[in-house]
Amino acid sequence: MNNLSPDYKRIYTDIINKNHPEKRELCQKILEKSELSILDILKLNALIFTNAGRETLKSNQQLRSYDKSTICEILEYQRKNNYTNHQLALHFKLSKNTITKWKKLFPDL
């Protein structure tokens, strides 16, 4: 069965070309990747939509979902930078409880 995920590279390229051509250079490095991770998508979203309101940011935060590879990447980032759960939560705008839950789900990371 094929993976039916959206083509985020194409979506964000179209958004940049149509609505935010001035931000093309900022996003170019991320868009050149062969495959975009969820963290790349979040970075693109933050770069393009910098003027989003507080309510929009809160709403978007509640609707995020992370796959196993992204969770592993986030936990690896914590390990490399010697971050506490609190520091990691602030950096990635996550809940400390979410990070604790991930650590219990993936104890070998």
Image (cartoon, rainbow, N blue to C red):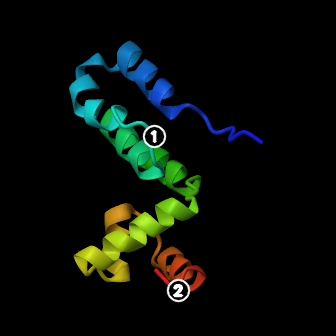
List the single residue furthest toward the top: 18
Please tell me whether mark 2 sits on a helix, a strand or a loop.
Answer: loop
Direction from residue 62 to residue 92 in the image, left or right: left
- Depth check: 36 or 53 in front? 36
Whole-percent x, y for residue 99 in the image: 48, 76
Please tell me whether mark 1 sits on a helix, a strand or a loop.
Answer: loop
List the single residue furthest toward the right: 1
Q: What residue is drawn where x is 50% and y is 26%? A: 11
Q: Quadrant of residue 62?
A: bottom right
Within 10 Å of disc 2 (Cα), the crowding (few <14, some 14-19, many 20+) is few
- Depth check: 106 or 99 in front? 106
Direction from residue 39 to residue 23 in the image, left or right: left
Within 10 Å of disc 1 (Cα), the crowding (few <14, some 14-19, many 20+) is few
Q: Looking at the image, tell me whether mark 2 or mark 1 is earlier in sequence order.
A: 1
In the rendered image of this protein, does residue 21 appear above or below residue 109?
Answer: above
Q: What residue is drawn where x is 60% and y is 34%? A: 6
Amino acid type, callout 1? Glu
In the rendered image of this protein, does residue 1 appear above or below residue 20?
Answer: below
Q: Are marks 2 and 1 in contact (CB under 8 Å)?
A: no
Amino acid type, callout 2? Pro
Which of the numbered marks, if any, corresponds to residue 35? 1
Which of the numbered marks, if any, corresponds to residue 107? 2
**How far separated are the C-alphas under marks 2 and 1?**
27 Å
Whole-percent x, y for residue 63 in the image: 59, 52
Q: What residue is drawn where x is 35% and y is 79%? A: 86
- Depth check: 93 or 6 in front? 6
Whole-percent x, y for residue 76 in the image: 37, 72
Q: Quadrant of residue 32?
A: top left
Whole-percent x, y for residue 31 in the image: 35, 32
In the rendered image of this protein, does residue 13 appear above or below residue 57?
Answer: above
